[in-house]
């Protein structure tokens, strides 16, 4: 290996692992050279009602983008996650729920979960939901989130989960975009001891932001005893409709290519897009990646700290683990409540074996010092995972030392909402790791690097990361807008899926993700389109123009840097700055809250009026040595003013 800093695979770990290096090499080769045989075999890891005879039928040709896997097979996802386990593990715990309050927890067996899902599914039917309808879930991290997801899959409804941190306005646009008839929410959510009014947000989305155009029903989970406003002809209590429903609900037979869920995510332009995932290929891929990458074995307790509002929660809290008959932990709270040792306390309490979290959480804990986890007993841990953003080598080695006691392999998992499951990752029994590198492709994944003209870079080098052929977990389309799907992902580098990320490949063929190459920023592992924040800002009466860029932030990975030009008659002030920050929070949600707001009399523009973001990015990074040629700007003096008043000074 070319680098000094290599962590070899522990031979004892490899000896018990599902995949060692010899297996990885052999299986990877087959997955590329004979995908039909490889995926034909892997498809058998789940149960089919009618077995498939066709495995792969995919085209990345921009004139005809079409992605189908197992297309003539039929199955049901909830039957795969529940019914098929009942005979062998009905009494095994499926979900360990750990509440925000450390005194509150619940263990739900596969048998209990099956019953709760069947009742919920019948309750959905009783509220008029049919196969193909879209159900929006706006829920905290409570068991009902998993129950509602599986209940949708049981009857062939499509779920669209909206993260509970999004504002009423953002929720409404996702409800309307998906033409959803029903929302499932809770009266409040609990985070860090505070109650967040989810139901009131749903009411505002419906009554003030246009979601009344499609919403007919709201199912409300009673999370806390606090009262909420009630609409007799719209709202029903979850516990009441479930108690009234039968516990017998046969699973609907679904085609492999029927939609399973929609998940909205940010892109570089326009409003968030609803990525659509389908039933068969997604489940095969989620289940396989979960088993091999986390080296999940019978009896292990597995914990992914993500929220079900993001794709990580879909694939690696619910679908992958439950398809594998695993015990999956679901955590309602935050890492800093009641104090910063919470992650350690939960690992100790439930004897967690695999722990999967985000670099932003690791960095926040790291800042608190070496003894942040107190005297928590972490000896149950066998493996650690990281997801959502590049993990800097310092955070990697700290995670390895403090959580892993130097003995747990770390899987740095690169993937996206669009990919459905993990794509580039070390397999813990096979791949020596280098801190900061996501290392090698998973089975069936063919990454390539291309320059801006689309020429492939061979050997070591830097470029745009593309994937040259399909894998079963891939998103099939954007809900209601297939043309946008084709344009966004398949038109830039013809014949390949464009990831939007940049990457470097080293001499050993390892991939190092360098971050987004488009106008998407990654704030604490949350994807944000700069265009979304800009359009929120220009909706404020004082704002004439706004430009948003990312800048390096010690804790969040990237922070949000906003340049604002005010309309005539408005004066810059600290109060206005506060007001704009709150404005963005209420338009999108707290995760979009600007870190820095610089008032600027003008924007650097080309003579044709285009904002030169490259210059704004450099100034936000406090690196104006490399501004490049500014002489083509309409008014080059704008740049001097921006530099003089810059807010991020190293
Ligand atoms: C980034 C989250 C570096 C990347 C699963 C990608 C990462 C975007 C990693 C997708 C990683 C995710 N190393 N960067 N291990 N994992 N990313 O859709 O920029 O919320 O394009 O999916 O996160 O974010 P999304």
Image (cartoon, grey):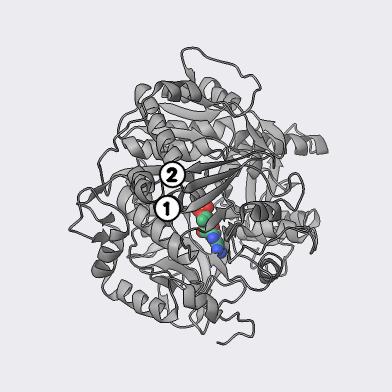
Please state if 333 lies on the left or on the right of 133 as rendered. right
The foreground one among 489 and 31 is 31
**Residue 354 visible at all:** yes
Q: Residue 630's x, y, as percent? A: 65, 63
Does 571 sit left or right of 609 as displayed? right
Vertical position of residue 425 compared to residue 89: above or below: below
Q: Position of residue 274 (x, y in %)?
A: 43, 43
Q: Image quadrant for the N terminus?
A: bottom right
Secondary structure at numbered mark 2? helix
Task: Give the label on residue 110, or none.
Answer: 2
Q: Is mark 1 within 8 Å of ligand 1?
A: no
Quarter where residue 8 is shown: bottom right
| Among the 4 quarters of the image, the one containing residue 445 | bottom left
Single out the residue that lies furthest toward the left. 53
Residue nearer the viewer, 375 or 330: 375
At mark 1, the secondary structure is loop
Tag of residue 203: none
Is disc 1 in contact with disc 2, using a CB cutoff of under 8 Å?
yes
* Percent of width and height locating residue 103: 69, 40
Beta carbon at label 2 within 8 Å of ligand 1: no
- On the image, numbered disc 1 is attached to which residue? 325
Residue, x 69% and y 44% (percent of image)? 564
* Quadrant location of the C terminus in the rendered image: bottom right
Of residues 312 and 465, the one drawn nearer to the viewer in this rendering: 312
Residue occupying image coordinates x 57% and y 50%: 306
């Amino acid at each position: 290996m070319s680098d000094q800093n290599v962590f070899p695979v522990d031979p004892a770990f490899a000896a018990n692992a599902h995949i060692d290096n010899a297996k990885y090499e052999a299986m990877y080769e087959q997955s590329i050279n004979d995908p039909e045989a490889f995926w034909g075999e892997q498809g058998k890891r789940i149960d089919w009602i009618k077995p498939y005879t066709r495995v792969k039928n995919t085209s990345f040709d921009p004139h005809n983008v079409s992605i189908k896997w197992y297309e003539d097979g039929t199955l049901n996802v909830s039957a795969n996650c529940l019914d098929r386990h009942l005979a062998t593990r009905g009494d095994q715990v499926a979900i360990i729920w750990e509440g925000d309050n450390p005194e509150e927890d619940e263990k739900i067996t596969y048998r209990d979960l099956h019953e709760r899902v069947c009742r919920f599914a019948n309750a959905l039917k009783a509220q008029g939901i049919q196969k193909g309808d879209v159900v929006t879930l706006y829920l905290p991290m409570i068991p009902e989130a998993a129950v509602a997801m599986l209940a949708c899959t049981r009857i062939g409804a499509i779920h669209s989960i909206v993260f509970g941190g999004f504002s009423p306005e953002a929720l409404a646009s996702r409800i309307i975009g998906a033409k959803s008839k029903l929302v499932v929410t809770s009266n409040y959510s609990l985070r860090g001891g505070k109650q967040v009014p989810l139901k009131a947000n749903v009411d505002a989305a419906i009554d003030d932001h246009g979601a009344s155009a499609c919403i007919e029903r709201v199912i409300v989970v009673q999370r806390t005893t606090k009262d909420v406003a009630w609409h007799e002809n719209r709202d029903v209590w979850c516990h009441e409709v479930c108690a009234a429903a039968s516990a017998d609900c046969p699973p609907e037979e679904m085609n492999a290519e029927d939609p399973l869920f929609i998940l909205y995510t940010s892109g570089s332009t326009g409003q968030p897009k609803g990525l659509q995932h389908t039933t068969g290929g997604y489940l095969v891929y989620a289940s396989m990646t979960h088993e091999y990458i986390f080296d999940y074995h019978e009896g292990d307790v597995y914990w992914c700290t993500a929220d079900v509002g993001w794709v990580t929660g879909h694939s690696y809290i619910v679908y992958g683990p439950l398809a594998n008959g695993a015990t999956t932990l679901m955590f309602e709270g935050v890492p800093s409540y009641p104090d910063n040792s919470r992650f350690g306390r939960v690992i100790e309490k439930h004897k967690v074996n695999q722990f999967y979290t985000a670099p932003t959480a690791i960095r926040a804990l790291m800042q608190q010092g070496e003894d942040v986890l107190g005297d928590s007993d972490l000896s149950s841990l066998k493996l650690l995972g990281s997801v959502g953003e590049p993990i800097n080598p310092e955070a990697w080695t700290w995670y390895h030392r403090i959580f892993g006691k130097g003995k747990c392999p770390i899987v740095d998992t690169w993937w996206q909402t669009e990919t459905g499951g993990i794509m580039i990752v070390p397999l813990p029994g096979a791949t020596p790791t280098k801190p900061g590198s996501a290392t090698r492709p998973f089975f069936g994944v063919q990454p390539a690097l291309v320059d801006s003209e689309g020429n492939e870079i061979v050997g070591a080098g830097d470029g745009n990361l593309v994937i040259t052929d399909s894998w079963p977990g891939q998103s099939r389309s954007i809900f209601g807008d297939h043309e946008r799907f084709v344009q966004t992902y398949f038109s830039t580098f013809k014949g390949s899926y464009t990831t939007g990320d940049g990457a470097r490949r080293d001499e050993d063929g390892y991939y190092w993700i360098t971050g987004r190459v488009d106008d998407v920023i990654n704030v604490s592992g949350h994807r944000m389109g700069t265009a979304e924040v800009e359009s929120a800002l220009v909706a404020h009466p004082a704002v004439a123009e706004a430009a948003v860029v990312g800048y390096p932030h010690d804790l969040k990975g990237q922070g949000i840097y906003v340049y604002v030009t005010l309309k005539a008659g408005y004066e810059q002030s600290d109060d206005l700055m506060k007001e704009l920050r709150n404005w963005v929070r209420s338009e999108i949600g707290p995760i979009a809250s600007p870190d820095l707001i610089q008032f600027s009399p003008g924007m650097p523009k080309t003579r044709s009026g285009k904002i030169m973001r490259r210059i704004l990015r450099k100034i936000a990074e406090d690196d104006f040595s490399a501004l490049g040629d500014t002489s083509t700007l309409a008014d080059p003096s704008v740049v001097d003013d921006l530099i003089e008043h810059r807010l991020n000074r190293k």
